[in-house]
Image: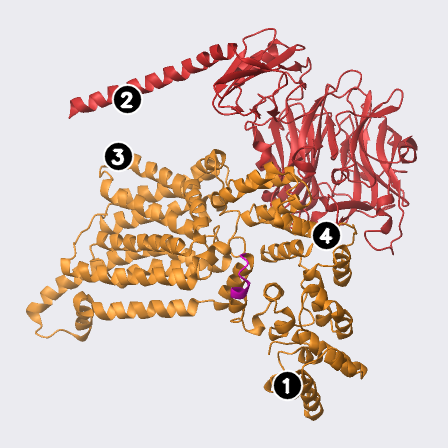
Chain colours: A red, B orange
């Protein structure tokens, strides 16, 4: 009996060893076969489309799927320096090993990254033209914070803000709405891409509408809802919008949902003394002001403003909803004296004939990235929304080539001003919002964008949530989700009421901020 | 589990027969009366979908491997869709019930009593009650079985020296907590009872209790960061798959086993004491006392077995009868039939619903079933209708998915594709990726010519084991023709789909239906529901005005309710020539005369209603128009 057992054990070991050896040898054999491959005069179709792009040197392996039919696949990833990566597989899914990928990118900053795809079909190897990508010199911010939410119209169960390490696929919860009893978490914003200075909005029937201020280890619950928020570069205050939102639905057409601000104003909160005040001239009763953004020197607050075209007695949504177009404005601010200047128009919607929204200025102060769409205040629901870049020195602006026929919005800059992350609905037929990354060169030209890489290249093909409001940040958010949730569930400590020009946002409708 | 006093072979065969009959009846009852298909259908309506949904693939499995109780949860999720086959669902339920029954046998044997006593049928009965309420307590049942199996293993294999016990007990507590989640706290309780009352091992009992209660704190709260409540009390609080109302049953199910073990151990001790006393007393007293005789009667299993069995079966039947919620079943069955296009069966099921139990959701199903069976104009008022009947509006705070799914299907069919998309998305985001909603959203996006979006929903659907084939087939069709022009459903819906946009919070029903008819004059559903709207809102004149179009929609004769509308309109305007023009049947004219006479002679409104119902007018439009209700 014992002898038999021993024999079986030896046999098992031999089988395992042989399998391992075969596993190791087969790719090399494939490689030799592939050397004699016939050429195909086109680029291989890969999914996601990671061809002819500029990639960050610190990005996670950009796994992809070869969309050419074949029984075996061989992919060689190489560059000027370092060992090439060779992946042989019977599946069309290409999983790139992380360590060699990282080494290759780091050793070839500023160089080309070549991807050669070989496919064996009907006993013949075919070699496609080489995909040549460029590895940027500049890193992308090491973390990305974003919101995950389903295609919400009114009801929802799960909304959460997450952070993702760009060098890996590691995703972690920043604040989950479930911890607030199906609450909504939204409008996360950071001071100068600093993860240690964060504001995050919450809406919960039980725990109220509030904002969590996280500065280092200090956590406070501000008992007021901050809408779209922009930190002053000093980190001493934040400007935010107060929006009274009206959501409505289209009976026909591509996009069902739509949103208008019935009333809106801009206020600011000083963290040093806890005061919350309206911004004079940006809280006009006759206008809608929204989307504040600071210039990097902190001297100007940029924002969007549109006239109110209806009266309180008009039905909602007002018949003029499609005529609302926002201008791009700015107003001077002196932080030391807490004085505001006069508003000036940076770009008029009369000139563009489009609604100008979501201005974001590059940290180096050179460029202003913004959206323009046919009408309204919420570009993500507007298929016509595109990204535009303005050179702030000349105030010349141009539509970026990276736009698609679908909505582009929710953009953010990396702290080195070389990368932008934005939301787009270009894939999956314009329904689901995904996060895209694009390199911006020194001339302000944005290069072909690519979707945020995932371990599974088919991840987005069945992913039923949207990834929106991507914010590039310079490190992991140092506060644990549990601590944030605890504070969110606590009583607010920093409360101020705003009275004056515009009505504060209605808080009865939890859906109001549950938008992509 | 170790048996202290094996039963005799004769007793085994009796018990086996009883058990066999019981579980045969149990199976038949679950299969044919409870109907596991409705348990499956009720997922998302009665029980939470998010905790019962299943997706194929490693990430989903891995996610479950990483949390305590994930394995049992995974098996539950995997098994739940199989309830769509009634016989298989009943088999799963019966197997779990048998497992609990077997465990009770093992526990009583452990305490030194014979098996086969009535108490063994308690857990199956509790499970039956849970299923009769259309909960899905499979996770509860499986967790219990895992813990009981663990306890069985402990009683057989646990070492008896303190050092080894100190290792084995915490190891088992960790293992059971990992597999079964917080239900594993039952394990230390059983260990404590067993060691303290049966084996009289104080150290082992206390060690088991300590570790069993400490593990959720260590693993769940401290390490995984669960709130204390979740780490411990999942089995005490309403668990996924079980409604709040059914929580007492779940609690009873969990407490049942330690109570039985405790009771059996104490009973055994009492017997031992009684036997000792009896031996002593026998030498002194010639005749037993009344209480002693009663005890002997109770202990004489063979003589009382038949009586007990009969009592148990009667008790079970009584409990099942009183626990039965017939209207819940009618609602679910009607909706189930409507969702599967079994319209006639839906009406058959709906016929069992008393009018006072009608809700707008139920009525919507009835009206849809009447439409699909071509009986809307003939029988609509045979069912309870009120002037509050609203087929179009859904309360935004509905807890379950039923109304959203209903209206999403309805709006899609009638041509309001955007509204259908909206409500289907409400289900998706509020409830989860129900296969039915994924399929519907795929179709909606095909209709809207968004093949890539449709593909996302189909890809998600292909991860549902029982829908994989359908999804793959649709994906293949989509691959062949992105526009899906040859697909009959897609092309039919495109023909009726609204293409002219409008926005409003509340769009008038009439305006919407008119727009649908403006889009496609052959939209029969829109036409029929426009007439229904006119009937319900008391506008017989509008019904009459539209009768000229009946032939365009394939009507060969004017349906009864429309004829009644003609009579009502004629009565209101005095233009009785209309009745000849539209060929109103004499019996309908007779109904109008009868109603007029009743109204003239009845001393009060209530009396008039009673008289009209007695005269057989309770199911007519004339009655509805006059009294604002029907189906009487």
Q: Quick check: B267 above or below B66?
A: below
Q: Is residue A263 left or right of residue B222?
A: right
Residue A508: give its label. Answer: 4
Percent position of residue B345, x then y: 51, 65
**SS label for mark 1:** helix
Disc 2 sits on a residue from what chain?
A: A
- Magenta segment: B340-346
In the picture, measured across the screen, residue B294 lies left or right of residue B552, that is left
Subunit of label 4: A
Magenta-drawn stretch contains B344: yes
User: Whole-Å distance between the Cαs marked 4 and 2?
Assistant: 67 Å
Q: What residue would you read off at disc 3?
A: B164
Alpha carbon distance from label 3 to label 1: 83 Å
Q: What residue is shown with label 2? A: A12
Q: Is residue B258 visible?
A: no
Q: Nearer the viewer, residue A272 or A300?
A: A300
- Is the residue at mark 4 from the same chain as the one at mark 1? no
Tell me, yes or no, if residue B488 can be seen here.
yes
- Chain where mark 3 sits: B
Query: Against B488, is B305 above or below?
Result: below
- Give x and y (percent) for residue A185: 66, 41
- Determine contact: label 4, label 2, CB under 8 Å: no
């Amino acid at each position: 009996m014992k002898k038999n057992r021993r024999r079986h054990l030896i046999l098992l070991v031999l089988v395992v060893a042989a399998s391992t050896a075969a596993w190791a040898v087969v790719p090399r054999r494939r490689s030799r076969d592939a050397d004699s491959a016939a050429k195909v005069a086109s680029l291989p179709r890969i999914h996601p489309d990671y061809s002819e792009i500029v990639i960050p040197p610190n990005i996670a392996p950009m796994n992809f799927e070869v969309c050419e039919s074949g029984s075996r696949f061989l992919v060689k990833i190489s560059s000027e320096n370092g060992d090439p990566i060779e992946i042989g597989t019977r599946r069309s899914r290409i999983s790139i090993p992380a360590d060699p990928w990282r080494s290759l990118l780091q050793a070839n900053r500023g160089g080309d990254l070549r991807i050669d795809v070989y496919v064996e079909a009907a006993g013949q190897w075919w070699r496609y033209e080489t995909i040549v990508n460029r590895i940027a010199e500049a890193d992308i911010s090491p973390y990305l914070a974003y919101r995950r939410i389903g295609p919400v119209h009114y009801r929802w169960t799960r909304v959460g803000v997450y952070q993702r390490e760009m060098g890996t696929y590691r995703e972690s919860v920043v604040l989950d709405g479930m911890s607030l009893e199906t609450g909504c978490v939204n409008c996360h914003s950071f001071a100068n891409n600093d993860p240690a200075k964060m504001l995050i909005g919450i809406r919960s029937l039980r725990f109220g509408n509030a904002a969590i201020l996280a500065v280092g280890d200090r956590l406070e619950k501000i008992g007021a809802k901050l809408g779209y928020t922009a930190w002053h570069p000093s980190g001493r205050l934040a400007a935010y919008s107060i929006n009274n939102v009206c959501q409505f639905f289209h009976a026909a057409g591509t996009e069902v949902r739509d949103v208008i601000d019935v009333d809106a104003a801009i206020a600011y909160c000083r963290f040093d003394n806890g005061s919350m005040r309206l911004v004079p001239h940006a809280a006009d009763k006759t206008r809608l002001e929204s989307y504040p953004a600071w210039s990097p020197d902190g001297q100007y607050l940029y924002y969007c403003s549109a006239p109110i075209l209806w009266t309180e007695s008009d039905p909602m949504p007002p018949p003029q909803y499609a005529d609302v177009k926002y201008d791009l404005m700015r107003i001077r601010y002196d932080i030391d004296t807490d004085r505001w200047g006069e508003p000036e128009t940076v770009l008029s919607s009369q000139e563009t004939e489009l609604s100008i929204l979501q201005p974001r200025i590059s940290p180096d102060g050179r460029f202003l990235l913004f959206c323009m769409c046919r009408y309204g205040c919420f570009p993500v629901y507007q298929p016509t929304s595109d990204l535009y870049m303005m050179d702030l020195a000349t105030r010349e602006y141009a539509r970026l080539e990276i736009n698609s026929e679908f909505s582009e919005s929710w953009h953010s800059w990396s702290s080195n001003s070389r990368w932008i992350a934005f939301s787009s609905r270009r894939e999956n037929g314009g329904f689901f919002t995904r996060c895209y990354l694009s390199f911006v060169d020194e001339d302000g030209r944005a290069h072909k964008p690519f979707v945020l890489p995932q371990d599974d290249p088919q991840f987005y093909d069945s992913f039923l949530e949207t990834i929106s409001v991507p914010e590039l940040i310079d490190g992991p958010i140092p506060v644990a989700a549990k601590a944030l949730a605890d504070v969110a569930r606590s009583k607010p400590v920093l409360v101020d009421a705003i009275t004056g020009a515009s009505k504060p946002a209605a808080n009865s409708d939890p859906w109001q901020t549950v938008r992509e | 589990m170790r048996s202290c006093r094996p039963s005799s072979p004769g007793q085994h065969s009796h018990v086996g027969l009883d058990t066999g009959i019981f579980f045969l009846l149990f199976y038949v009852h679950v299969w044919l009366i409870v109907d596991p298909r409705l348990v499956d259908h009720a997922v998302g309506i009665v029980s939470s979908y998010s905790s019962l949904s299943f997706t194929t693939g490693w990430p989903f499995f891995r996610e479950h491997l990483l949390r305590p109780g994930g394995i049992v949860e995974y098996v539950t999720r995997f098994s739940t869709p199989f309830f769509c086959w009634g016989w298989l669902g009943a088999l799963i339920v019966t197997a779990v019930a048998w497992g609990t029954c077997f465990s009770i046998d093992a526990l009583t044997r452990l305490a030194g009593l014979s098996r086969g006593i009535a108490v063994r049928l308690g857990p199956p009965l509790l499970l039956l009650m849970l299923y009769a309420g259309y909960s899905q307590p499979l996770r509860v049942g499986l967790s219990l079985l895992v813990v009981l199996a663990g306890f069985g293993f402990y009683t057989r294999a646990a070492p008896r020296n303190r050092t080894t016990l100190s290792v084995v007990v915490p190891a088992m507590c960790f293992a059971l907590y990992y597999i079964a989640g917080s239900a594993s706290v039952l394990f230390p309780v059983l260990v404590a009872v067993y060691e303290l009352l049966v084996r009289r091992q104080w150290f082992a009992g206390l060690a088991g209790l300590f570790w069993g209660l400490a593990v959720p704190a260590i693993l769940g709260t401290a390490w995984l960061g669960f709130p204390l409540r979740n780490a411990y009390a999942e089995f005490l609080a309403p668990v996924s798959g079980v409604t709040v109302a059914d929580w007492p049953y779940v609690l009873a199910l969990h407490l049942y086993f330690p109570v039985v073990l405790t009771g059996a151990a104490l009973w055994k001790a009492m017997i031992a004491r009684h036997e000792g006393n009896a031996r002593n007393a026998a030498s002194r007293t010639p005749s037993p006392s009344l209480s002693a005789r009663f005890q002997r009667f109770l202990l004489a299993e063979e003589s009382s077995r038949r009586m007990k069995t009969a009592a148990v079966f009667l008790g079970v039947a009584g409990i099942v009868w009183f626990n039965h919620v017939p209207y819940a079943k009618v609602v679910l069955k009607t909706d189930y039939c409507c969702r599967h296009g079994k319209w006639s069966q839906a009406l058959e099921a709906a016929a069992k619903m008393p009018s006072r139990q009608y809700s707008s959701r139920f009525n919507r199903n009835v009206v849809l079933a009447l439409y699909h069976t071509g009986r809307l104009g003939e029988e609509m008022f045979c069912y309870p209708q009120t002037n509050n009947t609203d087929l179009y509006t859904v309360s935004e705070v509905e807890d379950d998915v039923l109304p959203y799914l209903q209206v999403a299907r309805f709006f899609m069919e009638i041509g309001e594709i955007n509204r259908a998309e909206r409500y289907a998305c409400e289900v998706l985001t509020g409830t989860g990726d129900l296969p039915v909603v994924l399929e519907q959203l795929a179709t909606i996006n095909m209709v809207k010519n968004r093949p890539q979006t449709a593909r996302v929903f189909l890809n998600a659907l292909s991860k549902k084991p029982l829908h994989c084939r359908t999804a793959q087939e649709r994906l293949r069709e989509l691959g062949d023709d992105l526009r899906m022009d040859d697909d009959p459903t897609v092309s039919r819906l495109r023909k009726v789909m609204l293409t002219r946009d409008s926005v409003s919070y509340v769009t008038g029903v009439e305006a919407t239906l008119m727009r649908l008819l403006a889009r496609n004059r052959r939209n029969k559903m829109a036409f029929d529901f426009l007439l229904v709207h006119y009937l319900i809102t008391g506008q017989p004149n509008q019904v009459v005005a539209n009768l000229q179009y009946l032939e365009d929609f394939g009507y060969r004769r004017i349906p009864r309710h429309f004829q009644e509308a003609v009579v009502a309109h004629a009565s209101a305007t005095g233009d009785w020539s209309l009745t000849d023009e539209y060929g109103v049947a004499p019996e309908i004219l007779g109904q109008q005369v009868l109603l007029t006479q009743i109204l003239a002679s009845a001393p009060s409104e209530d009396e008039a209603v009673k008289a009209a119902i007695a005269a057989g007018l309770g199911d007519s439009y004339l009655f509805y128009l006059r009294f604002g209700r029907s189906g009487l």
